[in-house]
Amino acid sequence: MLPCVLLSLNEYFSARRALIDEYLTQLSTRIDAPQPLQAPLRRSLTSAGKRVRGILAIAVGESVGAKAEKLLPAAAAVEMIHASSLILDDLPAMDDALMRRGAPTLHREFGEDLAILTSVALLNHAYGLVAESYAASAPRRWTLAQIVQRVVDAVGWQGCVAGEAVDLHSEASNLDFDTLEYIHSRKTGALFVASAAVGGMLANIHPASLQRIEVFAKNLGLAFQITDDVLDVTADAAELGKDVGKDAQRLTFVRLAGVDGAQKLSRELVETSLAAIEPLGAQAKPLRDLAVMVRDRVR
């Protein structure tokens, strides 16, 4: 494979996405689970996702000298954690969504019971894949406990779960920008930060560089969510492959600032992301390109 610095923008991200997709597809053929769980697990592993979080983990690791192939288990892990969260988010008790990634949501196809079990299975197996990446890495600056803690912080009661809980139990009329930022920095931003951190730590990133990477990822994750808010009111379901207009009764960045204001805020967050990694030099080019893709995406 060509070094990342020699690949064009589309080639780089297409190649990394293909690696992650291939890994997840192979994993789906080795599922050792009871028959009722096999189909929902396979669908969850192979459904068409953007793989932004997995690509982020690989791009950070490559920026400090790791090989993409050695980061694949960890990249797959963060994609599985993301898929796990989407399954829960779509449930009738949460968003009660009809479509996800261009297909019926998992609970509509397989039932709520198997959807919940699939989500739990994906999350738990993901931790094992992070450990697998760690076992294949050498030398090691960071301990496995430090790396896993980044994932725990992103997923647990201080991360995605916290954001979802506050989102579900807040009245839109009482929300302000700080509360909205709290919700989405955890629902979306926390896993961006963990993806970047895990990729960097597995590649023995220096602590000072890790801090910059985490600032980059936090702001990029929030920009990604704001763009989602914009697309929820400006795109259609066929373009996005999921329900739109589901946030009409919630306070979003678009309802706070309007479409133009939300887009401006997203651009500002991307600029903050780019400034954070400026000292990292040419090897961080894929990260800069990823920030531009987040800023300019239309689906």
Image (cartoon, rainbow, N blue to C red):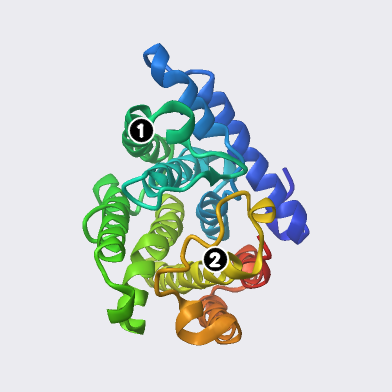
Q: Which mark is residue 112?
A: 1
Badge nearest the viewer, 2 or 1: 1
Work out which quarter of the rendered image holds the C terminus and state it: bottom right
Give the amino acid type for the residue marked by disc 1 in the picture. Answer: Glu
Could you tell me how far apart the alpha carbons at marks 2 and 1 are, in whole angstroms?
Answer: 26 Å
* Front residue (pair 23, 5): 23
Q: Position of residue 232 (x, y in %)?
A: 56, 65
The residue that appears at 78% across and 59% down in the rendered structure is 8
Q: Position of residue 85 (x, y in %)?
A: 39, 47
Secondary structure at badge 2 equals: helix
Work out which quarter of the rendered image holds the N terminus and state it: top right
Q: Position of residue 120 (x, y in %)?
A: 31, 35
Disc 2: which residue: 228
Q: Is 8 displayed left or right of 71 in the figure?
A: right
Q: Residues within 10 Å of mark 1 (few under 14, many from 20)?
A: some
Give the amino acid type for the residue marked by disc 2 in the picture. Answer: Asp
* Front residue (pair 232, 283): 232
Relative to 5, is 251 above or below?
A: below
Q: Earlier in the sequence, mark 2 or mark 1?
A: 1
Point out the residue furthest to the left here. Answer: 157
